[in-house]
Image (cartoon, grey):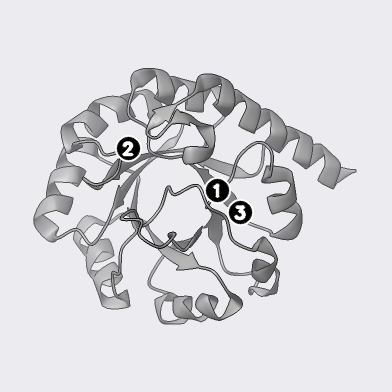
Amino acid sequence: MSLEIKICGLKSPDAVAAALDGGASHVGFIFFQKSPRNVTPGEAGRLREAARGRGRAVAVTVNADDAFLDAVVDAMAPDILQLHGKESPERVGEVKARYGLPVMKAFAVSEPGDLAAIEPYLGAADRFLFDAKPPKGSQLPGGNGVAFDWRMLAGLDPDVDYMLSGGLNAANIGDALRLAAPNGIDVSSGVESAPGVKDAALIEELFRAVRDADKSRAA
């Protein structure tokens, strides 16, 4: 599959194996204590070993300081750093310079005007991730299982490299790929049987749906 697929919020060897065996290009590990998908740097370091030579390991942090990022990078050796908080363009540049790693910056969107927020980050972040704005009362910046109107992404400059996230699952991925044109997708809650619990059957179902969507687009 040419579409890059990131299965995020992995917490167990079985979940990592299911993602990689299904064809994931990226596996994501979340460092955010309020999340049911939270792992420690040491846990992520052990889990990511299975991805070496098979997929790119992504460390997802939220407004992390240098000390915590140092711990993550030292223990996990990620291929990509994903910043999912309110990090400024200057902070993105600092992180890139400090670790020499690609940085993906996440943005929460709900209406077309929200996309203007990426402009100061053009040239700073290597890639963007567009997620739905959290529901009122949620303490999680992502992984809430809600989607946004994917049609708003159709007007993006085609040179903008982004992953699509937010409420994606096997049932709606065909519509998402038809309405938007992401270079990659990021799925977490959409392949879970309970918050933080990845389901191998749902992961397999997602990859099957992506293959079916690719066939439909090709036809």
Quarter occupied by residue 173:
top right
Could you tell me the amino acid type at mark 1?
Answer: Gly
Q: Kindly report which numbered mark, 2 or 3, lies closer to the viewer in this rendering.
A: 2
Q: Residue at x 53, y 52 (%)?
A: 146
Q: CA distance from mark 2 to mark 1?
A: 16 Å
Q: Is residue 81 above or below residue 192?
A: below
Q: Residue at x 51, y 81 (%)?
A: 116
Horizontal side of residue 137 vs 175, given as left or right: left
Label 2 sits on residue: 37
Q: Is residue 66 above or below residue 124?
A: above
Quarter occupied by residue 75:
top left
Label 1 sits on residue: 167
Q: Secondary structure at mark 1?
A: loop
Q: Are marks 2 and 3 in contact (CB under 8 Å)?
A: no
Q: Which mark is residue 183?
A: 3
Q: Where the C terminus falls, by quadrant? A: top right
- Measuring from the top left, give residue 114's x and y in whole percent: 51, 77
Q: Are marks 2 and 1 in contact (CB under 8 Å)?
A: no
Q: Residue at x 40, y 67 (%)?
A: 125
Of all residues shown, which one is farthest toward the right?
A: 219
Could you tell me the amino acid type at mark 2?
Answer: Arg
